[in-house]
Amino acid sequence: MGKVIVVGFASPLHRHRITALSGVDAIIYEEGDVGNVKVGDSIPILLILSGGVSRIVERFVDLNGIRSAMILSHPSNNSLASAISARALLEEKGVAVSVYHLGSIDNVPKVIKVMESILKIKGSKIALVGVNEKGGVGEAFERKFNAKVDAIPMSLLEEAVSNVKSNDAKSFMDDVLDRLAFEVPLDKLINVGKIYVALLNMARNYDALALNCFPYLIKHGVTPCLALAKLNEEGKLTACEYDLKSLFLMMIFHALTGYSGWIANVNDIEGNLVRASHCTIALNMIKSGKVVTHYESGNPYSISAEINAKTVTAASVSPDFNNVYVFTGSLNRSGDLGLNACRTQAEIKVNFDPSIILNYAPANHHVIVPGNYINELTVFLRMLGVNVVKYSSLI
């Protein structure tokens, strides 16, 4: 993965308005100066500081052979007008480019941090835990992002869990007992604590994990749901059902929002409502929660919780990781909604006919986060060569 380089562009007429900017590597004021800044193998962010620079940007992109870039604009100095012009010029040349408009020029360092986090997916190392082979999706992830996907057999997970001492799981148990209301016996909580510690130890060697949880819960009579809830709160991203596609979206959303996102089944649509559910959710995404049995198995433990959000974004990715399908909506209600479904349940109100999801969704699982992040997904995923499709645009 190349380093992110931020190059600012300003007209000589605006030179006196430009002050020192955090995170900006160079500023170009004249077309004749574009050859003085080399991108090399760095990832370019083109910061439009003023109007009148679209041709300078075009020349800079040509000289450096840039085929993909992000353009940043801000509210002052006719920046946005020039950013739009530059985007149009570059698109005519076949350059993959998007404009991201900042609320303030002071937000440049934040954008750099997000970009660096997202670009870490390139060359990342992922573990599929509880499987014997990475499969076609794992191979597609490796090809798309020059990544490494390891398959870790179930026997190695079981061995790791058995090697965890009871005392090492105590802090996990104390934390969930303090924060969640248990409506089921506690006799197997120590088992979940040991799963948590075993996965936490594995996470030290990987950027993210995806766990094949159903075979484990069938054999051992206990689910890893609580362990995943705490791991994801702590930024040790772990997907259930060894869902690498959802794990990819969790990595993206965590970089954008600080939340891992909630992997959810689409269970029902009615009118303009989408109903979704799953048996685990990151603990930092909930307002209140209780611990109950797992939906399909009746085994301990699962979380039934209200989601701390008003607006949400939901996304699902294609098996080749080329396309992400998204929608936003308002969270109508969440928690235990009385649905015959997994334990954390949500009802999302959308402004399009949600039946479109049934025939265009690339997978059942959608990763859901608080807030509206469609624009951010569109801009940042383009830097990974991933296209964003709004469900509402398919109608």
Image (cartoon, helix red, strand yellow):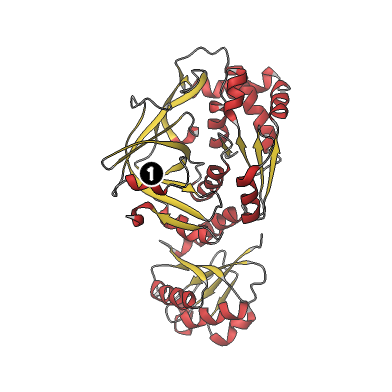
Residue extending farthest to the front is 359
Mark 1: which amino acid? Leu
Q: Residues within 10 Å of mark 1 (few under 14, many from 20)?
A: few
Percent position of residue 160, x then y: 72, 26
Q: Quadrant of the N terminus?
A: bottom right
Query: Residue shown at 44%/51% (left/top)?
Result: 325
347 lies above or below 376: above
Q: Quadrant of the C terminus?
A: bottom left
Seen from the viewer's position, the closer of residues 133 and 36 is 133
Query: Residue shown at 73%/24% (left/top)?
Result: 159
51 lies above or below 343: below
Query: Residue shown at 45%/42% (left/top)?
Result: 366
Percent position of residue 34, x then y: 59, 82
Seen from the viewer's position, the closer of residues 228 and 223 is 223
Seen from the viewer's position, the closer of residues 18 and 249 is 249
Percent position of residue 45, x then y: 55, 67
Q: State the image quarter where residue 205 is shown.
A: top right
Seen from the viewer's position, the closer of residues 235 and 277 is 277
Task: Decide if residue 234 is in sight here.
Answer: no
Task: Decide if residue 221 is in sight here.
Answer: yes
* Secondary structure category for the residue under label 1: helix
Q: State the image quarter where residue 162 is shown.
A: top right
Percent position of residue 294, x then y: 48, 22
Residue extending farthest to the bottom is 32
Residue extending farthest to the left is 271
Number of numbered tags placed on the structure image: 1
Q: Which residue is mark 1?
A: 358
Q: State the image quarter where residue 59 is shown.
A: bottom right
34 lies above or below 162: below
